[in-house]
Amino acid sequence: MKTILSEKLPRILKNKKRLESKLNVKITHRGKEVFIQGKPTDEYTAGEIIDALNFGFPFSTVMLIKEEDFIFEVLNIKDYTKRRDLKRIRARIIGKKGKTLQTLHQLTKCYFELKDNLVGIICSPEFLESGQEATISIIHGAKQSNVYSFLEKHQVKPIVDLGLKE
């Protein structure tokens, strides 16, 4: 049994039936604690999905973790900068009217979400490194246009499935 502390319990309860049916787990709650019961692999996946829901990702994006073997990763902005004006750094990541995040999504094929001083990334394992590098470059102060051109020059080739996956 896995236990997760949830800040956004209503989001989980609203999607509880769908989560239980798609993830093959039993979800119960008491207070802000969410309990997951099932096979260990299913519990791990459900834990990742509930963490991503708590982070603020939409339900459709979160379900990609189960359906397409995506990864959920969190970067702490404070780990990559000593600057005190974190509000400005968050603004640089978001961009004007969300344009930077949208462009990063198109170039890296990753889904981004900001919460406090954390950046959440959901993407395929082969695109994770480019998504992290782009975000870290913007945190360090690189111009967005330079990050975009770097991503365009170093596009990751998708891995071809040879039918070995189950």
Image (spheres, rainbow, N blue to C red):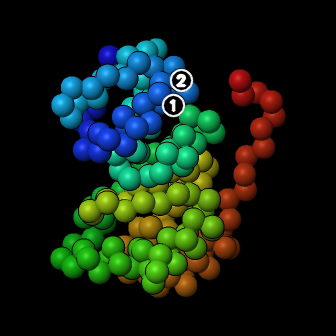
Q: Nearer the viewer, residue 19 or 145?
A: 19
Q: Amino acid at mark 2?
A: Ser
Q: Nearer the viewer, residue 83 or 55?
A: 55
In this orientation, does residue 41 appear?
no
Q: Amino acid at mark 1?
A: Arg
SS under mark 1: helix
Q: Which residue is mark 2?
A: 21
In this orientation, does residue 152 appear?
yes
Can you tell which quarter of the image residue 29 is in?
Answer: top left
Q: Label 2: few (<14), some or many (≥20) within 10 Å?
A: few
Q: Nearer the viewer, residue 157 or 31?
A: 31
Q: Nearer the viewer, residue 19 or 81?
A: 19
Q: Quick one: which residue is furthest to the right in this view?
A: 162
Per the model, the C-alpha gap separating discs 2 and 1 is 5 Å
Q: Are marks 2 and 1 in contact (CB under 8 Å)?
A: yes
Can you tell which quarter of the image residue 114 is in?
Answer: bottom left
